[in-house]
């Protein structure tokens, strides 16, 4: 019996979320199904491109987070002292 694999299976394979048994079966399916192989190759390229994206928060965002954190810490200390 031949197992039919979905694009979801290919994505799981791409992100190493499959068992060794599944890996073998999916790799075989990729060699036999051109559409599945094209999807795998396209997905692999997109994954590689996404891994190159670097996002840096603005200084204003960092300052707001730090301010909130300081205020939160002070409130926690005050609450602990009043108990």
Image: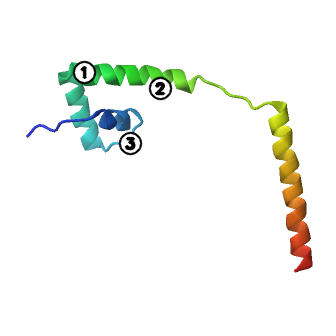
In three-dimensional space, the C-alpha distance between marks 2 and 3, rounded to whole angstroms, equals 15 Å
Q: Are marks 2 and 3 in contact (CB under 8 Å)?
A: no
Count of number-bearing discs:
3
The part of the image, by quadrant, that contains residue 30 is top left
Q: Is disc 3 surrounded by few (<14), some (14 to 19) or many (20+) residues within 10 Å? A: few
In front here: 23 or 49?
49
The part of the image, by quadrant, that contains residue 19 is top left
Disc ID at residue 35: 1
Vertical order, 78 against 36 (above or below): below
Q: Earlier in the sequence, mark 2 or mark 1?
A: 1
Give the SS element for disc 1: helix
Q: Are marks 1 and 3 in contact (CB under 8 Å)?
A: no
| Residue found farthest to the left | 1
Q: Are marks 2 and 1 in contact (CB under 8 Å)?
A: no
The percent coordinates of residue 46 (x first, y second) are 46, 22
Q: Earlier in the sequence, mark 1 or mark 3?
A: 3
Residue at x 84% of width, y 42% of height? 64
Give the SS element for disc 2: helix
The percent coordinates of residue 8 (x first, y second) are 33, 37
The quarter of the picture where the N terminus appears is top left
Q: Which residue is mark 3?
A: 17
Disc ID at residue 47: 2
Residue at x 39% of width, y 38% of height? 16
Residue at x 89% of width, y 55% of height? 71
The percent coordinates of residue 34 (x first, y second) are 22, 19
Q: Earlier in the sequence, mark 2 or mark 3?
A: 3
Q: Is disc 1 surrounded by few (<14), some (14 to 19) or many (20+) residues within 10 Å? A: few
Nearer the camera: disc 2 or disc 1: 1
In three-dimensional space, the C-alpha distance between marks 2 and 1, rounded to whole angstroms, equals 18 Å
């Amino acid at each position: 019996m031949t197992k039919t694999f979905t694009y979801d299976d290919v994505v799981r394979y791409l992100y190493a979320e499959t068992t060794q048994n599944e890996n073998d079966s999916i790799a075989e399916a990729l060699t036999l199904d051109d559409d599945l192989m094209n999807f795998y190759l396209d997905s692999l390229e997109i994954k590689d491109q996404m891994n190159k994206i670097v996002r840096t928060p603005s200084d204003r965002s960092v300052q707001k987070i730090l301010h909130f954190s300081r205020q939160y810490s002070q409130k926690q200390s005050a609450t602990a002292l009043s108990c």
